[in-house]
Amino acid sequence: MAKKTYQLETVSCPSCIAKIEGMLKTISGITESQVLFNSSRVKVSYDEKEIASERIKEKIISLGYNVLGEK
């Protein structure tokens, strides 16, 4: 099990949070996710055997949110 935090550009509305959280819940291999509105961060716990961090990042970007960094 791996954990990653992605720093996004400023997330400006609650519907953005819901959009990102809803998408993450549909991805196989992600066991837990949380989008933090105040810090514009996404915390994800996932199974590295099922999905790579880069793929999660790509999914977030595909929704229109730039990922500024990850750790």
Image: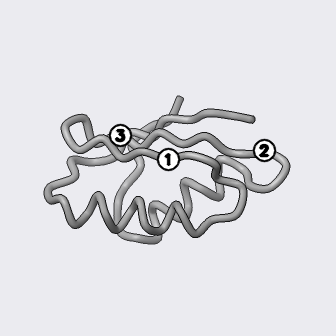
Choose the circle earlier in sequence order: 1 or 2.
1
- Is mark 3 in CB contact (under 8 Å) with mark 2? no
Amino acid, disc 1: Ser
What residue is rendered at 57% in x and 69% in y? 26
Badge 3 element: strand
Badge 1 element: strand
Q: Residue furthest top?
A: 71
Q: Which residue is mark 1?
A: 33
Nearest the eye: 29 or 10: 29
Amino acid, disc 2: Glu
State the CA–CA distance, disc 3 to disc 2: 20 Å
The answer to which image quadrant residue 6 occupies is: top left
Badge 2 element: loop
Nearest the eye: 12 or 30: 30
The answer to which image quadrant residue 22 occupies is: bottom left
Q: Residue furthest right?
A: 49
Choose the circle earlier in sequence order: 1 or 3.
1
Q: Which residue is mark 3?
A: 41
What x and y, as percent, mark residue 63? 40, 70
Amino acid, disc 3: Arg
Q: Give the colouring mode of the picture.
A: one colour
Q: Which mark is residue 48?
A: 2
